[in-house]
Image (cartoon, rainbow, N blue to C red):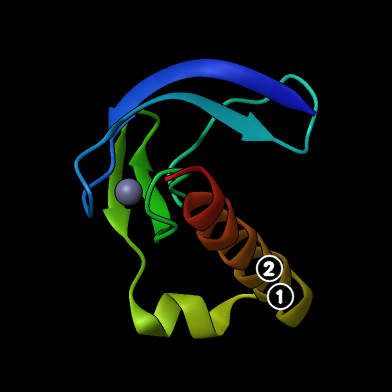
């Protein structure tokens, strides 16, 4: 797992995102990579290493089932954490 500084802004909630974490070693974000905003939980797509857009329904449906399940689980955990801490 690698975490790199890649400051960008979430296009959905407009929060500044400071880091990108990848399951692959020594790899930063690349155009076309799928991500999730740690603040609002929206599924995002990197257009460039520091520019994101919200993933379309079509792009979300094209994700492999296990990957979509992991993102969905991460979003559920994020929602629970917000209820506990906010
Ligand atoms: Zn967001």
Dot 1, how many residues are within 10 Å of its Cα: few (below 14), some (14-19), or many (20+)? few
Residue at position x 33%, y 75% in the image: 56
Q: Is residue 65 visible?
A: yes
Do the residues bearing badges 1 and 2 touch, measured as CB atoms within 8 Å?
Answer: yes
**Residue at which label 1 appears:** 69
**Residue at which label 2 appears:** 73
Find the distance from the CA under tag 1 to the CA under tag 2. 6 Å
Image label count? 2
Residue 34 % position (x, y):
52, 54
Q: Quadrant of residue 51?
A: top left
Residue at position x 71%, y 68% in the image: 67
Q: Residue furthest top?
A: 5
Classify residue 11 as left or right of residue 36. left
Describe the element under mark 1 as helix, strand or loop.
Answer: helix
Q: Nearer the viewer, residue 78 or 12?
A: 78
Residue 8 % position (x, y):
30, 28
**Which marked residue is nearer to the observer: mark 1 or mark 2?**
2
Quadrant housing the N terminus = top right
For label 2, being within 8 Å of ligand 1 is answered no
Asked if residue 2 is positioned above or below residue 40 in the image, the reply reads above
Q: Is residue 33 visible?
A: no
Describe the element under mark 2 as helix, strand or loop.
Answer: helix
Dot 2, how many residues are within 10 Å of its Cα: few (below 14), some (14-19), or many (20+)? few
Asked if residue 7 is positioned above or below residue 76 in the image, the reply reads above
Residue at position x 73%, y 23% in the image: 2
Q: Nearer the viewer, residue 72 or 8?
A: 72
Asked if residue 46 is positioned above or below residue 12 in the image, the reply reads above
Q: Nearer the viewer, residue 25 or 8?
A: 8
Quadrant housing the C terminus = top left
């Amino acid at each position: 797992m690698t975490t790199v500084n890649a400051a960008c802004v979430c296009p959905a909630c407009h929060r500044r995102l400071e880091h990108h974490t990848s399951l692959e070693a020594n790899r930063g974000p690349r155009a076309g990579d799928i991500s999730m905003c740690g603040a609002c939980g929206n599924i995002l797509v990197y257009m460039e290493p520091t520019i994101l857009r919200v993933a379309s329904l079509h792009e979300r449906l094209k994700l492999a089932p296990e990957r979509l399940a992991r993102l969905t689980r991460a979003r559920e955990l994020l929602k629970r954490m917000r209820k506990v801490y906010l």
